[in-house]
């Protein structure tokens, strides 16, 4: 089966799935791509039936641009990084997310939060490496160790085209732990008939990470650790 990719998918589902082609279904990838915003490169073709047909140069360029996954472990002297809850609410497993791109962990390990408040704060001090400027519904941060985390507000919220979302940061900004990053209107999302459940993902493929540990806890505040990243 041949799929024409019109751009780099905003959160890396396409290429993460190819890294794990044996456990990911092409229909999951396709259904996800069709729902999402496409901000970049056009015209690449990809044969999903064979990983060997994948254009490796494009892959490496994409990884460097989006996540810097080619980077090795830095000299930061830590063995583990705690990810605190960026949103107040109820913490649930990814299996509860009504989107197979998240629930099957095709993009990576993580948890989800059912928000009780429409504010997103930085789960650690670091740098904003990606913000979806038009839809405003997702962003990615990078810790000084190189660990990156994706926060995706709601499901299919890209369709709101930024309505109900207010960004407080831009790509490239340095942020402090607990700093306000984004505000969103829960009522606007729910009135549109969209789930407000919010995945917090540690994308696959980060060489510095040895293990992602999910920490127990039914509720989350801004100071509650929800994941521990072992380096």
Image: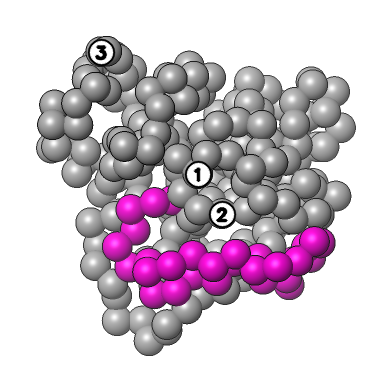
Instruction: Give residue 219's position: percent from left, percent from top.
Output: 81, 61
Residue that numbered label 2 is attached to = 110
In space, the residues marked 3 and 1 are separated at their CA atoms by 23 Å
In the rendered structure, find residue 105 and report the number of the disc placed on it.
Answer: 1
Image position, residue 221 (x, y; %):
79, 65
Earlier residue among tags 1 and 2: 1
The magenta segment is: 203-231
**Circle 3: element type:** strand
Q: Which residue is mark 3?
A: 2
- Residue 212: in magenta span: yes
Q: Residue at x 64, y 43 (%)?
A: 95
**Residue 25 image-quadrant placement:** top left
Residue drawn where x is 19% and y is 26% of the image: 50
Q: How many marks?
A: 3
Q: Secondary structure at mark 2?
A: strand
Q: For the residue labelled by badge 1, is the local secondary structure a helix, a strand or a loop?
A: loop
Is 141 left, or right, of 14 in this rendering? Answer: right
The quarter of the picture where the C terminus appears is bottom left
Query: Is the residue under label 2 in contact with that under label 1 (CB below 8 Å)?
Result: yes
**Crowding near the residue tagged with mark 2, few <14, some 14–19, many ≥20 C-alpha atoms within 10 Å:** many
Label 1: few (<14), some (14–19) or many (≥20) C-alpha neighbours in 10 Å: many
């Amino acid at each position: 089966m041949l799929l024409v990719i019109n751009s780099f998918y905003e959160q890396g589902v396409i290429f993460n799935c190819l890294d794990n082609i044996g456990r990911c279904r092409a229909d999951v990838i396709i259904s996800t791509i069709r729902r999402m915003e496409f901000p970049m490169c056009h015209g690449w073709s990809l044969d999903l039936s064979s990983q060997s047909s994948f254009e490796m140069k494009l892959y490496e360029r994409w990884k460097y641009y989006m996540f810097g996954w080619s980077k090795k472990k830095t000299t930061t002297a830590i063995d583990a990084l705690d990810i605190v809850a960026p949103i107040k609410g109820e913490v649930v497993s990814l299996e509860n997310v009504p989107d197979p791109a998240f629930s099957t962990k095709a993009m990576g390990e993580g948890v989800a939060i059912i928000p009780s408040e429409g504010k997103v704060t930085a789960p650690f001090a670091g740098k904003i490496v990606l913000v979806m400027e038009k839809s405003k519904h997702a962003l990615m941060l990078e810790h000084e160790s190189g660990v990156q985390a994706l926060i995706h507000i709601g499901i299919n919220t890209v369709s709101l085209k930024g309505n109900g979302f207010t960004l407080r940061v831009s790509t490239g900004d340095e942020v402090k732990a607990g700093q306000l990053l984004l505000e969103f209107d829960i009522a606007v999302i729910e009135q549109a008939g969209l789930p407000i459940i919010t995945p917090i993902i540690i994308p696959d493929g980060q060489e510095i990470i040895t293990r992602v540990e999910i920490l127990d806890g039914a509720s989350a505040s801004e100071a509650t650790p929800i994941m521990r990243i072992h380096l």
